[in-house]
Amino acid sequence: MFRVRIAFSKQDPVRWLSHLDTQKAFERAMRRAAIPLAFSEGFNPHPKIAFASALAVGIVSFGEYVDVDLAAAVDPAEVRERLQKAMPEGFGIHGVKAVPPGTQALMAVVNRAQYRLRVPLQEPLDEAVIAAALSRSLAEASWLVEREGKKGVSTRDIRPGLFQLTGSRTDDALILEMLVQTGSEGNVRPEEVLEAVCRYGDLSVDRERVRILRLGLFVAQGERLLTPMDVL
């Protein structure tokens, strides 16, 4: 068994693909590129493709990662070249590395996500007002949000999962950048952070027209922030 880790981006028009459709796009592209996929055993074999974190529909990302098991060893540089030619428009293949045996699964190690949000303003705001709103928001001990799940609506405090938050204004929009928790220990959604900032900071923005960009996924090791490629 030979495993490779692929760094990729997802922009227009494929940002509208679901997570399942994204997985299918990779599978079809690997087949077109004649890259030998490894399959699971059992009654319904499926290719061994594992993404670091699901990306919500409509979100652009510059830093996604996926591990793929191959049935035979292929040079990572060749995988990158052949796969990029076979991927649909909007996917960018930015790097491929061999994954050493015994390496932890992507979903087990990725624990941080960085986002940039562009939110249209509903009234003029200067930098001082934005800074004051963020200060009021961050001073709150807890940020309670409601989530719909299989067992109904639950309330969760997302404040402990926010590690960095900055805000600025450009033209007629609020720009928020944040570093939040993701992975097996829990996820903080960028739209939830926006909701909390609007609520506790009393900001008037058009949350319905927010544009979300995932800048990257990371592995936090103490004070260090590494990419999933760095830890190989």
Image: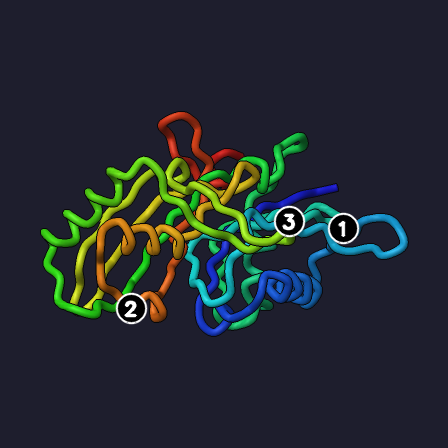
In the image, farthest residue toward the right:
43
Q: Are marks 3 and 1 in contact (CB under 8 Å)?
A: no
Disc on res. 38: 1
Q: Amino acid at mark 3?
A: Ala
The residue at the point 75 percent across, 41 percent down is: 1
Q: Amino acid at mark 2?
A: Asp
- The Cα atoms of the two marked residues, 3 and 1, are separated by 12 Å
Q: Quadrant of residue 136?
A: top left
Residue linked to disc 3: 50
Label whose residue precedes the other's in the sequence (2 or 1): 1
Mark 2 or mark 1, which is nearer to you? 2
Q: Residues within 10 Å of mark 1 (few under 14, many from 20)?
A: some
Nearer to me, 21 or 176:
176
Mark 2 or mark 3, which is nearer to you? 2
Q: Quadrant of residue 86?
A: bottom right
Residue linked to disc 2: 206
Q: Is residue 91 above or below residue 226?
A: below
